[in-house]
Amino acid sequence: MECQTGTTAWQHSRLQDVCLSDLRLLLASLLAGLLLPLCFSQLPSLGWLVPLLPAALLLWRVGAAGRCLCFLLCGLVWALIFHHQAIAQRLDQALDGHTVQIEGRIAGLPEQTETGRRFQLESVRRQDSGETLPSLRLHWWGGEPVAAGELWSFETRLRRPRGLSNPGSFDYEAWLYAAGTGGLGSVRGGERVSASASASWREALRARFSAALAPVPEGQRLLALVLGDKSSLSDSDWEVLQATGTSHLMVISGLHVGMLALTVFWLTRQLLRWGRFAWAWPQLWLSAPVALAAAAVYAALSGFAVPVQRALLMCALACCMQLWQRRPSPLLIWLAALVVVVALNPAAPLRAGFWLSFMAVGLLIFGLSGRLALQGVWARWGSAQWVVYLGLWPWLVLWGMPSSASALLVNLVAIPCLSVFLLPLALLGALVELLTGWPLLLQYAAGALGLLFNGLTWVAGFSPLVHFAFPGWLGWLCALAGSLMLLSPLSRLLWLPAGLCLLPLLLPQFARPDQGELQLTVLDVGQGLAIHVQTAEHDLLYDAGARLSSGFDLGEAVVLPALLASGVTRLDMLLISHADNDHAGGALAVQQRLPVERVISGEPERLAAGLVAEPCRAQRWTWDGVTFELLPGAQQQAASNDRSCVLQLSAGQSGVLLPGDIRQAGEYHLLPALRRASVLLAPHHGSVSSSSYAFIRQVAPRWVVYSAGASNRYGHPHPKVVARYRELSVEPVYTAVSGAVRFRLDGQVEPELTWHWREKARRFWHEQ
């Protein structure tokens, strides 16, 4: 429908509503086109753009539906061009795993880790050939201090942006792709070439404020609030914030940007009303740009993260509409900001923060619009917290994030304390320190933040995190509809269907093996081992991955989410083959978050006391028609690997053998007790010291699974071992290539390799 100027005020208002409705449809269509490629497992060729562009132009003249399709195709074309360019900028396959001398400039704020420094390197080139390389994410173990803006020369082992691939766990490759990172690297050595000609102002501010806050205990936390420096918060700080649902408060967020813009807007209006400040034009012409400029400066401090982009764009659109003397609906402003952010970076929706930030604002618009019964500031504030708490629940489940039981009540108090008191005091203190060198206000703000953290720590002590498994897309969409029903103005009429729609989240249903069947999932934990064994009513975890020296715990980050994704609420047994870190490091994290009936290990004396592990002894039992048998390793005086507790499983005529890290001596020791097995886990990750001919012939497997990291420094699996299995006609499966793999064994039919997770969940940004 064409928008025309009417002859009466009523007609003009009606036409304006129709035009805005049409604009919302066009923006929604454009957004759908921008998001559509994120569903593709492979990007279509750019040759498809040739017919798409003329089709879009033709559709523009075919009524309202044609215009919507035109906008959808335009969004699709733009997104495809962006994604093709982004993929083309990745590290060349020829450099994967090679050590080269590179030169580049430090970008952003470097992060201090437990083992060194992690940072982004931009404007990268090879020193030997001058070849331009993509932006790299580097880690320097025990390296020298680096600062943003500095030019460095590094000897770096490069690799493609590849991560672990498991059900339910964080998609690291998507995170890297959304950040524009084209490769990873481990620094072997480096030399500073020069400081930045214009030193990074964020780095300079961090150094200055850090020195000013040094006298205050834990005062560095304030840097997260003032500069968006997440590295200033310790792991224990993040645990407290997660347990209380307040992580969004301790970095520069959209809420903070909006609050600052409103405060500056109000202060400017008040100053202009004061007689000493003469202003000949309307007050709005000055107060709106000043507020927007203040918000932009504060947003720049955070490096323009996605939530901050959203807030800044919405502030800018609101200011423009005010200056233009138009009052569009908040929904239109929200939708326009959403489209602009995605158009600028079509990969931005691959980050959880994008959806949580935009959905929180969208829910407030949806849940509080037209609520005439809400009177008073506190009634509206409480309702706003309820809307966000309930409305974001399905989105947290979608991204595998836990919910905090105390988040609703804590945020009712914490947000006003921080936004109304702490944030203005911190920013005022930072400004005063910059202008006069007087740090007292900044230190007062740090002290007040410490008091707030003390309160949050106390609440976190009895506030459990609630983990919900993803119930599948149909169940999730049903739960999303239920939450929107409860937040709608008709919630009193829709509470019963809304409650029924939420049941898939509260009581998710997962397919389990039938009686006599066995499901085996070998997780991708890099250079380590973690295997989930599931029968009709029982669950066993064999090893739990490593806890890395950097503090990254694979038990918490990979194993636990994978168990939750399979519907596991408790473990009947946690079997830790032996105490080496790559097998036992993640066990404690799993036990702390899931009830575990028994813990058994080949080396219980070397495990954490909290595990209360029993020694591995010969025993045999049956769960749901599946036979389990433990075969103890060598005696206590033997080497650690040979003490691995070996597990044999039998489902009818099919079997599985999980031998841990036993070497050939251990294999010979167990030969008399071994039975044939369809699936064999390669002993010791395929080390040359294991997998003897006698052992392989005795087990006679159909598949051998190598659980080893890609391009690991041990060279696992060894080429001789791989050749040995191939010689004996055993089919290899590599977790480094396939990601997690799942087998289903039934005594009545042939064993089945159900899926390779990297193929099952593939998207175009995933490495082959």
Image: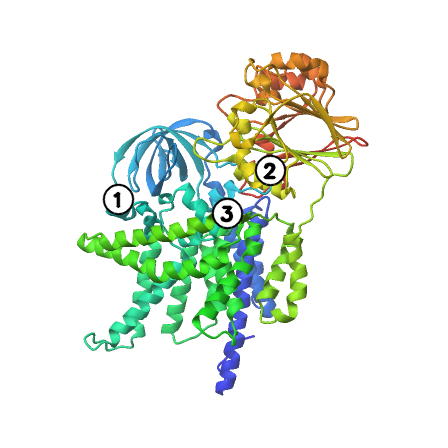
Specify the quadrant of the image occupied by residue 110: top left
Identify the mark nearer the N-term, 1 or 3: 3
Residue 661, percent across and down?
Answer: 58, 21
Q: Nearer the viewer, residue 433 or 418?
A: 418
Residue 569, percent across and down?
Answer: 63, 43
Q: Nearer the viewer, residue 243 or 360?
A: 243
Residue 509, percent across and down?
Answer: 69, 48
Residue 695, percent across and down?
Answer: 67, 15
Q: CA distance from mark 2 to mark 3?
A: 20 Å
Characterize the local packing of mark 2: few (<14), some (14-19) or many (20 or more) Cα atoms within 10 angstroms: many
Residue named by callout 2: 758
Which residue is at a point 21% across and 76% down the rendered structure image? 278
Which residue is at a point 73% across and 28% down the rendered structure image? 621
Residue named by callout 3: 83
Residue named by callout 1: 214
Identify the mark nearer the N-term, 2 or 3: 3
Characterize the local packing of mark 1: few (<14), some (14-19) or many (20 or more) Cα atoms within 10 angstroms: few
Q: CA distance from mark 1 to mark 3?
A: 45 Å
